[in-house]
Amino acid sequence: METNLAVLIDGDNIPSAYIKEMMEEIAKYGNPTIKRIYGDWTKPHLAKWKNVLLENAINPIQQYAYTQGKNATDSAMIIDAMDILYSNKVDGFCLVSSDSDFTKLATRLREAGMKVYGIGEKKTPDPFIVACDRFIYLEILKDSDEKDTVDETGKTKKQKKKNVDKITPKVIKLISTTISDVADEDGWAFLGDVGSLLQKKQPNFDSRNYGYDKLTPLISSIPKFDVESRPGQNSRFKLIYVRNKK
């Protein structure tokens, strides 16, 4: 059964330029049956959002800033989230914001058994990131776009725009210990189990952060690990296993 999601967007701190890639990403995790964006639509900084709301069937929620310096948008979004939770119409939430004010909301929704996906920019504080089941950076969604470049011979070729993180010793250690946690007696671990545990340990772990579309090529690029492809029950698909090199 498909997961129904409530997508709640903090319009005050999420750029509208990410909307297409963001909605495509959300569709991977479930059906966005409720889509709302919050902000003071009398303010000029939300003008760009107005042009894309109808195209993506997102319902704008007006929230006046009653007091200067106070974020009324956050309060409205939190109240709506709790109303949706108790309506029992969805199985999970997608909170789109880079604001740590939603940390408690994410925690409360997960306590109620909801799956919580967070989407925000890389400036998002860690408390909000770790409060979610999974956190996706907007920058990596935009980086998947391709641009035409001309090489020294004058040929045009496709090149991906990348703003990727380095694979640090800390990242390698995280992957290594995770493989050990789920490995069999011979040290081999099914890659699907490794990926699931990595996500639980670090909700913002994503191979795309390091310039790889999938986990397999990321791990294959690190000399510390062995990668093996095995035939599955369905001959069309191979099962990928990994282990720490001895």
Image (cartoon, rainbow, N blue to C red):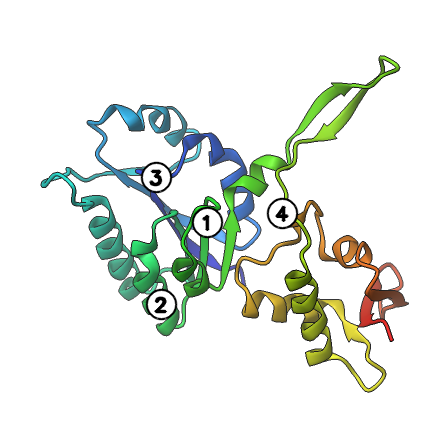
Q: Are marks 2 and 4 in contact (CB under 8 Å)?
A: no
Indicate the amino acid at tag 4: Asp
Q: Please tell me whether mark 4 or mark 1 is closer to you in this view.
A: 4
For disc 1, the marked residue is 119
Q: Are marks 3 and 4 in contact (CB under 8 Å)?
A: no
Indicate the amino acid at tag 1: Ile
The x and y percentages for residue 210 are: 67, 48
Image-based side of 60 in relation to 93, left or right = left
**Is 117 rendered above or below residue 8?**
below
Q: Nearer the viewer, residue 235 or 239?
A: 239
For disc 4, the marked residue is 165
Label 4, secondary structure: give it. loop
From mark 1 to mark 3, how far is it between C-alphas? 12 Å
For disc 3, the marked residue is 13
The x and y percentages for residue 84 are: 29, 58
For disc 2, the marked residue is 107
The x and y percentages for residue 36 are: 33, 43
Q: State which tag comes first along the sequence, 2 or 4.
A: 2
- The image quadrant that residue 51 belongs to is top left
Q: Please tell me whether mark 3 or mark 4 is closer to you in this view.
A: 4
